[in-house]
Image (spheres, rainbow, N blue to C red):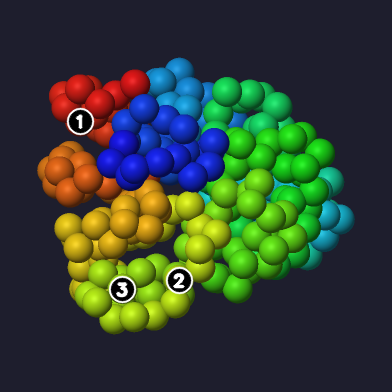
Amino acid sequence: MTTSAVRHPYLDHPGPIPFAHRGGSADGLENTTAQFRRAVEAGYRYMETDVHATRDGKLVAFHDATLDRVTDGAGRIADLLWSDVRHARVAGEEPVPLFEELLETFPEVRWNVDLKAEPALHPLLNLIARTRAWDRVCVGSFSEARVMRAQRLAGPRLATSYGTRGVLNLRLRSWGIPVALRRSAVAAQVPEAHAGLQVVDARFVRAAHARGLQVHVWTINDADRMHRLLDLGVDGIMTDHIDTLREVMEDRGVWV
């Protein structure tokens, strides 16, 4: 790892962190217990997932706001009861899991959780507290305000990454523009580029590391890009292609 110190137990990993994005969603079974199990069997101990809350407050591991794109069900998760969602099948095959079930099923796994909507905030924090999973979960969101609310409610025991505004401010700081940065974050989780503009370069990585932040880059599925980012000193890569990332890291001698 290239940062000088681990700011939270969640990040205690020897070397760059390989993340299985939605469990490694290249085969279409994203965010399912079966796909997470495949990643675990491939040696992954860090998973990226997303959470939404059903109308009755059940926290499901699912990316979209609606069931329509990847399941044989339909409707907004926030409008549905868990008793309805549980019958949907991802790719017509696998059930939508509760996040609590994933914590229980894979006790050695650490989870990077994209907090997709405000109604999921309190159920997520309550679940982490009840299961004492503070060291196993890092919470992120595109909404910096939502992550900040989670951080204020949970305090430093909760690992969080920057939202979009935090990432933008870190990019500006890397260019020498003096803008404020939230100090409670432990990582910047970012795309390699956005809207044709490079986000991750040597200056960005240096600026993050100077503030004790790790840099995790999503979603990288090409071996050449993985090598380039690891050459820059990034601290983690999220991928749909879990076999490719493992091969790259084994070739470099950094797979643990």
Residue of label 1 = 248
The amino acid at mark 2 is Leu
Mark nearest the camera among 1 and 3 is 3
Spatial CA distance of label 1 from label 3 is 31 Å
Residue 35, percent from left and from top: 50, 31
Q: Residue 243 sits in which quadrant?
A: top left
- Of the numbered discs 1 and 3, the one sitting upstream in the chain is 3
Element at label 3: helix
Residue 27, percent from left and from top: 40, 37
* Depth check, front residue: 5 or 104: 5
Answer above or below: position of 205 versus 104: below
Give left or right: position of 243 versus 91: left
Q: Which mark is residue 138?
A: none
Spatial CA distance of label 2 from label 1 is 33 Å
Tell me whether the residue at label 3 lies in contact with that at label 2, contact meaning CB atoms closer than 8 angstroms. yes
Quarter containing the N terminus? top left
The amino acid at mark 1 is Val
Residue of label 3 = 173
Mark nearest the camera among 2 and 1 is 2
Spatial CA distance of label 3 from label 2 is 9 Å
Answer above or below: position of 189 versus 110: below
Identify the residue at horizontal 80%, vertical 48% (top origin): 126
Residue of label 2 = 181
The amino acid at mark 3 is Arg
Quarter containing the C terminus? top left
Q: Residue 104 sits in which quadrant?
A: top right
Element at label 2: loop
Give left or right: position of 247 versus 107: left
